[in-house]
Image (cartoon, helix red, strand yellow):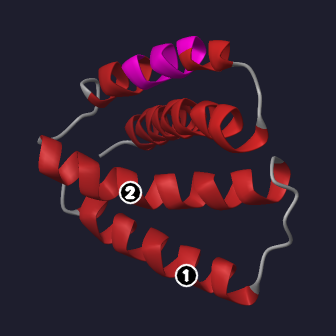
Amino acid sequence: MSALFLMKTLGLFIATAIAEIVGCYLPYLWLKEGHSVWLLIPAAVSLALFAYLLTLHPAESGRVYAAYGGIYVLTAIVWLRIVDKSPLSNFDLIGTAFVLTGMGILVYGWR
């Protein structure tokens, strides 16, 4: 497995995670924060993009979803810090490290 392949896959995982998080965050803003119902339109587009991006991943769907979960957790933790402006705890960081370790094992098995 080449470094270029891994970088492309990582980029695709990150894009997929962002599409999923945005697609879920926008309805949250509408329902919980009183923002415009019109946020549901870009939310739907984002979730459709998320579903499409999942089809571009390089392995069987079950393996992709399992490995993608690690990047989703990392992206959600980064989102927590940057968008929600919440400080990260040691548990956030250690938990994310464990998840990424598991993801690395799964991806290594794609060889």
Question: Looking at the picture, how far across and down is residue 56, in whole percent?
Answer: 28, 24
Give the residue drawn at x 18%, y 53%. Answer: 63
Task: Report the magenta residues as a range.
Answer: 41-48
Question: Which of the two labelled residues, at mark 2 and mark 1, occupies the earlier sequence position?
Answer: 2
Q: Secondary structure at mark 2?
A: helix
Displayed quadrant of residue 92: bottom right
Disc assigned to residue 95: 1
Is label 1 in a helix, a strand or a loop? helix
> Which mark, residue 59?
none
Q: Which residue is at the front of the view, 71 or 5?
A: 71
Circle 2: is it few (<14), some (14-19), or many (20+) Cα within 10 Å? some
Residue at image coords 24%, 46%: 64
Crowd tier of the residue under label 1, counting other residues whose Cα lies within 10 Å: few below 14, some 14–19, many 20 or above? some
Q: Residue at x 60, y 51 (%)?
A: 75
- Which of 51/58 is in front? 51
Q: Main secondary structure of the magenta part?
A: helix
Q: CA distance from mark 2 to mark 1?
A: 13 Å
Left or right: residue 77 compared with residue 82: left
Q: Residue under circle 2? A: 69
On the rendered structure, is 95 left or right of 102? right
Amino acid type indicated by mark 2: Gly
Residue 43 sits inside the magenta stretch: yes
Residue 111 visible somewhere in the drawing: no
| Image coordinates for residue 35, horizontal then vertical, percent | 77, 27
Give the x, y percent position of residue 52. 32, 19
Q: Is residue 89 left or right of residue 58?
A: right
Identified by mark 1, the residue type is: Gly
Question: CB of mark 2 within 8 Å of CB of mark 1?
Answer: no
Q: Is residue 90 left or right of residue 25?
A: right
Q: Is residue 109 visible?
A: yes
